[in-house]
Amino acid sequence: ATVLACSIAKEGFEKISKGANPVEIRRGVMLAVDAVIAEPKKQSKPVTTPEEIAQVATISASGDKEIGHILSDAVKKVGRKGVITVKDGKTLNDGLEIIESLKFDRGYVSPYFINTSKGQKCEFQEAYVLLSEKKISSVQSIVPALETASAHRKPLVIITEDVGGEALSTLVLNSLKIDFQVVAV
């Protein structure tokens, strides 16, 4: 596409330098762009079967059929709207790992929320979630969520712009002293 665009621009500038009307050149280029964009759409067809997905994935993987089948399996398991992340591994084998959970790009607010010995992680099962668009600095704003989670003996995950001050201190103390499962991210 870049080579084609450079060639079109070069030819257009040449024609303009020889006296062609720049407005007409632009109009012609825009018509050509519309045609070039429309043609692949006309020729395309939806990929529906796992075999077709594997074929497309194999082509995208430079002909590697094993990768094509792994990607097809991934699409089958997460669905068309699911998220697939491809990473370089530390082994010689290719594989598929399905993580049925929620991951955050940024982590917990305090290292005191770490609750597992395998790495610096905080992991919960069947947790309650509190979402807030605002910064939480007062513990009073989250007391109802803390009480509900505590009453039902469920972990609490607080997802917010920021947690600080009295609220953060209270969460850390609850996590350490009374073994209340809570994390703020």
Image: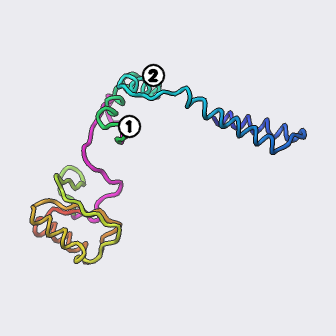
Image point (36%, 37%), residue name: 80
Q: Earlier in the sequence, mark 2 or mark 1?
A: 2
Image spot of residue 57 (x, y percent): 42, 28
Image point (32%, 65%), residue name: 160
* Magenta-tinted stretch: 83-112
Amino acid residing under circle 1: Asp
Q: Nearer the viewer, mark 2 or mark 1?
A: 2
Amino acid residing under circle 2: Gly
Q: How many marks?
A: 2
Residue 110 falls inside the magenta stretch? yes
Q: Which mark is residue 138?
A: none
Image point (11%, 65%), residue name: 179
Image point (15%, 62%), residue name: 181
Placement of the C terminus among the 4 image quadrants: bottom left
Q: Quadrant of residue 87?
A: top left
Q: Which residue is mark 1?
A: 88
Magenta segment, prevailing SS (helix, strand or loop): loop
Q: Nearer the viewer, residue 32 or 145?
A: 32
Q: Classify mark 1: helix, strand or loop.
A: loop
Image spot of residue 170 (x, y percent): 20, 74
Look at the picture and state if 95 lies above or below 171: above
Q: Classify mark 2: helix, strand or loop.
A: loop
Tell whether 155 sits left or right of 70.
Answer: left
Residue 98 falls inside the magenta stretch? yes
Image spot of residue 111 (x, y percent): 25, 63
Q: Which residue is mark 2?
A: 63
Placement of the N terminus among the 4 image quadrants: top right
